[in-house]
Amino acid sequence: MTVLWPAPYSLLCTVPCYRSLHFFLSEEANSICRDMFFEVELQRDVKIHATNLDKPVSRRFILACLLDNLFKEKASEDHGYFLAVTRLKSIGKGNVMDESGNTVFTVVFTCRTFKPFPGEELQGVVRYISQHGVLLKCGPIRNAFLSAWKMSKYQYIPGKKPAFLNNELSKIEKGVVVCFLVLAVRWINASRDFEMLASVDADSLGPVSLPGSDESEL
């Protein structure tokens, strides 16, 4: 099946910047998302500049460099977002790269990751609304697009505080937490991010809190 990603969604995309590799979920969100968490074994080459080699390089320093590299890498298409290094398995002997004296250490470690899949249920916080639909933030994923076509029981209400409202007065507006079904996921290599298409066309899906609720940051 070919999934068409609507133009308004692409135009609204922004790239988040994370301050830490360590993210936490609320207990409620964790019960929904646990199937998307993985423990994977990874290998990375960590380069240490010659200026830092005037004394023996400690494991702590190599780990700090590894974390900094993962912070910049942010995510991979195969494994998802890097959340935390859980175990340092081995550090290879340093290999001098060139005449500069820069040295590379091969590090093997396990890492906790988060990767969404179609068919899973998630919760996200509404961060933008237009007549085309809603943009949700779900943990490290800034752009989960809930199209107006995928909330067929809701009508768009324009105004200073636009919202989607159904016959039971259930309202989707900015700041509301929405339980949704993941329809499709795609990887954006340029920004190293995932984007999702969402739906609330089921009885168990829809808004689960009022505006002003505390958001669980990933």
Image (spheres, grey):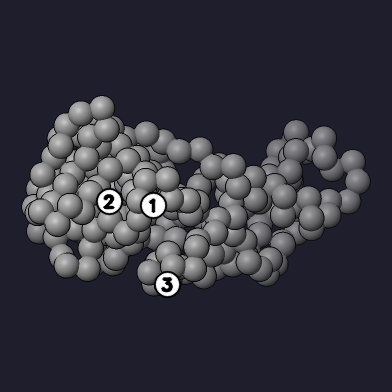
State the mark number for residue 138.
Answer: 1
User: Is 53 left or right of 175, judged from the image as shown?
Assistant: right
Which of marks 1 and 2 precedes in the sequence? Answer: 1
Q: Quickly name the residue at label 2.
A: 196
**Res. 42 image quadrant:** bottom right
Disc 1 from disc 3: Cα separation: 14 Å
**Res. 29 image quadrant:** bottom left
Foreground residue among 20 and 73: 20
Q: Relative to 159, does residue 185 appear above or below in the rendering?
A: below
User: Is 138 left or right of 67, judged from the image as shown?
Assistant: left
Foreground residue among 161 and 51: 161
| Element carrying mark 2 | strand
In the rendered image, residue 153, in percent from the top left (x then y), is placed at 9, 54
| Element carrying mark 3 | helix
| Element carrying mark 1 | strand
In the rendered image, residue 188, in percent from the top left (x then y), is placed at 33, 43
For the residues bearing labels 2 and 1, Cβ distance under 8 angstroms: yes
Which of marks 2 and 3 precedes in the sequence? Answer: 3
Query: Mark 2 is on which residue type?
Result: Met
> Could you classify mark 1 by the number of other residues whose Cα lies within 10 Å: few (under 14), some (14-19), or many (20 or more)?
many
**Res. 51 image quadrant:** top right
User: Is 163 left or right of 156, judged from the image as shown?
Assistant: right
Disc 2 from disc 1: Cα separation: 10 Å
Which of marks 3 and 1 precedes in the sequence? Answer: 3
